[in-house]
Amino acid sequence: MATLSFSLPKRWHSASVWLLYVVGLAPAAWTFYLGATDQLGADPVKTFELFLGLWAIRFLVLTLAVSPARDLLGWNYLRYRRALGLLCFYYVAMHFTVYMVLDQALDVSAVLDDVMKRPFIMFGMAGLVLLVPLAVTSNNLSIRKLGSKWIWLHKLIYIIAACGAVHFALSTKLLDLEQYVYVGLIILMILYRSYRPIMTARRRTAKRAATVAPKAA
């Protein structure tokens, strides 16, 4: 299958990953500046909080899309998946920090009352808790030490994606088009991940059959 992926020279791979971090964090930095200079409207804290949550979902979608893009389209961007996943974590962490510090002023009782009124918050918190071990182990040392356990640990991303989709979908009374798109993409990629082992097994069977057929002839 012909691929349409954009390929950089190998010497630029490391620099391109660092550039992705800079570009990925730029929206948060710019919006923080707008908030600090009173340019985010009547409720800057809530606007900033929702903005960070939206970008967390975007990076979650991009992280999940790396494997399907490689399998189905031949676009090999695996070297960026770690950066995309960490950017997702950074935005989730910032989203939670703004909620706890600026929105709720670290008032635990107010947070508990808010969770009782809006249970979808629990799904967001569960997603953050599950993201922490993935972020901590997103390095070559952890991959070497954990071995095959690392792969199983990082499959938590699909549970995290489900928590994120529920949190995102229930965060407003009415879903807009962008929410439908992101939630729909997350559902499709979770379903694809469930189907992927079956697809891989069928490909292996077909390959073996193709190899055996000429010998039998």
Image (tube, grey):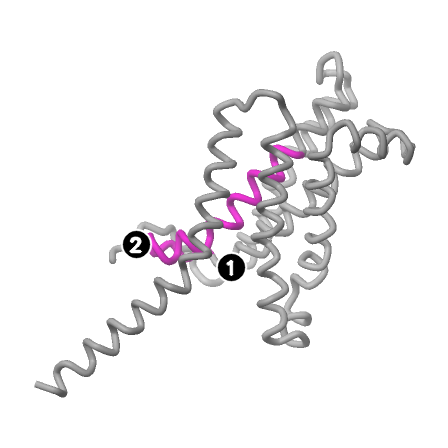
Q: Nearest the camera: 115 or 204?
A: 115
Which percent across, then down, holds residue 9?
A: 43, 59
Above or below: residue 21 compared with residue 96: below
Q: How many marks?
A: 2
Residue on which disc 1 sits: 79
Does residue 101 appear left or right of residue 26 in this picture? right
Q: Position of residue 188 (x, y in %)?
A: 44, 45
The CA distance from mark 2 to mark 1 is 17 Å
Q: Is residue 75 left or right of residue 151?
A: left
Q: Which residues are magenta?
A: 53-77
Badge 1 amino acid? Arg
Considering every residue shown, the one lying at the far top of the view is 42
Examine the structure image and report whether residue 41 is included in the region drawn in magenta.
Answer: no
Going 58% across and 60% down the picture, which residue do you hit?
155
Rendering quarter of residue 150:
bottom right
Which of the pair 158/32 is nearer the observer? Answer: 158
Q: For the point 69% across and 63% down, which residue is it?
A: 137
Above or below 215: residue 100: above
Quadrant housing residue 55: top right
Say which residue label 2 marks: 3
- Where is residue 170 shown, x and y percent of the image? 62, 30
Residue at point 57%, 47% (across, down)? 20
